[in-house]
Amino acid sequence: MISSILILYGSQTGNAQDVAERISRESKFLDISPRILPLDSYDVSELPRETAVVFIVSTAGQVAAKKLYRRLCSLGATACLDLGLGDDQHPSGYEAALDTWLPRMWDSFCSAFQWSFGMRPDDQGQLVDLGLPKYKVTFLTATSSLPVIIDLILTEEQRLQAAVEAAAAFRRVSAQASGQRVMREDETASVSEKAQFGPSHPFLAPVLENRRITSSDHFQDVRHIALSLRGSGTMECYEPGDLVNVWPLPEASLCEAFLSRLGLDGDTLIQVQANDPPAGCHLEVSIGTIRSFIEGVLDVTGASPRRRFFQVLSHFTPDTSEIEKERLSYFSSVEGRDDLYRYNQREGRSVLEVLQDFKSANPPLEWLLETCPLMKARQFSISSSSRMHPGEAHLTVAVVDWNTPYKRRRRGLCSSYLANAAPVGSQGLGQNSACSNQHSASKVAVWVEKGSLRMPMSLLVPLILIGPGTGVAPFRSFLQHRAVLMRCRANKLNSQSSPLTSEPLKESQPSSDTDIDASCVEGGNISACDDEVEPAPCSLFFGCRYRDKDCYYEEEFRKFQQDGVLTQGEAGFCVAGSRDQPQKVYVTNKLMEHELHVWKLLENHGAHVYVSGSAQKMPSDVLATFESIVTRKGGMSMEEAKQYMRQLEFKGRYHVEAWS
Ligand SMILES: Cc1cc2nc3c(=O)[nH]c(=O)nc-3n(C[C@H](O)[C@H](O)[C@H](O)COP(=O)(O)OP(=O)(O)OC[C@H]3O[C@@H](n4cnc5c(N)ncnc54)[C@H](O)[C@@H]3O)c2cc1C
C-alpha cells in the first residue's frame, strides 16, 4: 500500500464507529492503509504529523461536529472538503448524506494528495467480498485444558457477572482487532486503580427501591430507582451532576431464542481473539461461554443492526434460498437504503428478529461479533446527593416504550431492565417492579462517572435550573446537596450563637429519609464567607404534561421551597404542565413569564444556568428564550444577545447536558 489514512471517531450509539469502519473497508479496497481509532485513544500531539485524517463524531444536535471542524481549521488543518452532516432523523437515516459525501471525500483526497485509484467503492457489491473477519473464534475442545461445557443453571447474578466479564475482556480484544496497541492489563493500572470500579470492573449494586413516580393512568412510566453503593469505595462519595453507568442484561428468553435460531449451545466455551493483531503485541484473548458473549458483548435483542450486517447475512445465505438472498443483497445496496431503513431502523428491528425473518441465513460467530450491534452501558444522571443519602444513588428513569409505524411495540432495553428490577428481599412477591419475576435483577452492574454539569460549591452563587421531565434528575441532586450545605450553615450559626447547646449535625437534624453523612459533608464544606451572607436565590423550572400525573418529586421540591433551598414565590419553583390547559405551556414559556427575575439573576447577580434533558428541541428552544430575554430586558440587539449567551457559556455560567 502506498498511502495511509487515519480515521478517528467519537461514538455514543455506534453510528460513528460504523461509519469509521465503512471508511476503513473502502480505503483497503482502494489500497490505502487505514488506521482506525476512537478519539479518546489517540495521542493528539501526533496530529501535526498526520497526512490525511477523517474525523467522525456523533452528537446530539450538530454543534460538536461544527465546533470540532472550526477548531481544527483554526489550528491550521486544511479542510479537504466541506463538513458532512448526517442526520439519523432523516427519512433515510444518516446514510442518506453519507452515501453522497463519501465519494466526494475520496475525490478530494485524490486531488489533495495525488492519489490515484482504479476502481471506486461506490458499488457496495464490490465490498461484499468479506475477506478475513476481524475475530478468530475457537471452540474449546475436549483436548484443551479447559472444561468444554459448563453444566450449570445460572442465577441472575451469575448471568450478570458472566456478561460483564465477557464484555470487559472483549473490549480489549476488540481494540486489538481494530489495530490499537493494547497494554497488558497488569501494566496499565496500579493496584489501587484495579480495586476501583469502572467499565472493566462494574460494581454489582443491590436495588433498594423501584417505585413508579408517575400516576398509573399516565402514558409514561417513570421510575425512582434507589441503588446501594455501600462497599463501592470512592463511588459512594459522588458529586452532584455525576452519572451512573448501567450495564443492561437482555431478557434471558430472547437470548435463548437467538441461540436456538442459530443452533448454538449457549454453554459451550469459546475463545475469541483478534485475527490480525498489531505486530509485536501480546495477544489478548477472551474466554467465556457462547451465552456470555450473546448476553454481554452483543446486543441481539434491542438495537437494530446496520447495513453491513445485511451484507454479511446475504453472504451467508445459500444460493438455494434465492428470494431471501436477493432481498438481503438489495438491502445491502445503496438503492435499497430507503427500504432497509423502513424495514430495519424505523421498525426498531433487532438482530434476532431479522434472523427470524431470514430463516436460511446462517452467519458464523466471528462475523456476528464483527457486525452485530455491541452491548453498551446507558448513562443516568444521579438524582440524589451522597451527603443526604449516604451509600445510595437514586436514578430517575423514564421507561422507553413506543410503537413503530407498523404498530409494533418496542421497549428500551436498559430502562425496561431497570423497571423490572426487584428490590432486594422482594423477589417473587411481585412488589414495586413493573413485572417482578424470578428473572428480575436485584443487583445491577454500575459505575459512576463525572458528568458535565458541575454545581458551584458556594451557596452564594445564584442558580437557574431548567429540567423538563427526567432532565430534573441532576437538579434533585443539586438541591439535596444545597439543602445539606444550608443545614450545615444553620448548624454552624446556631453553634456560634449558643455553643453550649450545639449538637452534632446528625443528631440535630434527625430525619428518616434525609440521614446526612457528616463525614461526607466535611468534603463539601461551605466556605467561611458563606456563613456571613444569606444563600443566593435558586430557581427550578420543571416541565411535565399534567401536574397531577407526572410532576414527580413535587412534594420534595415544595419542601425545599419552604426551607429556602429554592427561592420562595412563583419564580422559585415553576412547573410548566404542557397539557394542563388548551394551549401548550413549556419551560420556555415559564422562563418568559419570569423574564425580569431571570434577567436580574443573570445580569446583576452572576447566576449560573443549567439545562438538562431530552436533546430533541428543548436545549435550542431554551437558548433562544434566553436570547430573547436578553434582547427584551437588556436592550440588546439579537446579535448582541447571542454574543452575551456565548460569553456566559465561555465563562462557565451556561451548562447543558442533553441526551437523545
Ligand atoms: C448524560 C446522560 C444522562 C442521562 N440521564 C438520564 C436520566 O436521568 N433519566 C433517563 O431516563 N434517561 C437518561 N439518559 C438516557 C439513558 O441513557 C438511555 O438512553 C435511555 O434510558 C434509553 O435507554 P434504553 O436502553 O431503555 O433504550 P434503547 O433500547 O437504547 O432504545 C432507545 C432507542 O429507541 C428508539 N426510540 C425510542 N423512542 C422512540 C420513538 N418514540 N420513536 C422512534 N424511536 C424511538 C431510539 O432509536 C432510541 O435511541 C441519559 C443519557 C445521557 C447521555
Image (cartoon, grey):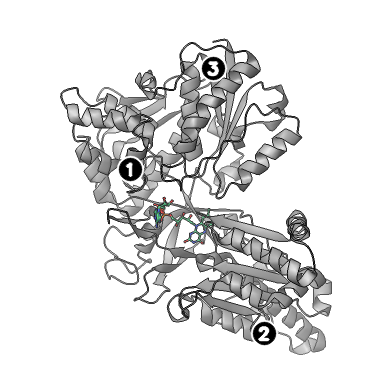
* Tag 1 near tag 3, CB within 8 Å: no
- Residue of label 2: 568
The location of residue 618, given as percent across then percent down, is 56, 61
- Say whether disc 2 or disc 1 marks the residue closer to the N-terminus: 1
Residue under the image location 20 percent in, 24 percent down: 318
For marks 1 and 3, give the CA distance: 32 Å
Q: Residue furthest left?
A: 320
Residue annotated with mark 1: 344
Residue 366 occupies quadrant: top left
Specify the amino acid type for callout 2: Gln
Observer-nearest residue: 594 or 467?
594
Q: Which residue is mark 3?
A: 33
**Residue 402: x and y, percent?**
35, 59
Three-letter code, disc 1: Asn
Q: Please determine whether, in this image, residue 415 is positioned above or below residue 78.
A: below
Q: Secondary structure at mark 2?
A: loop
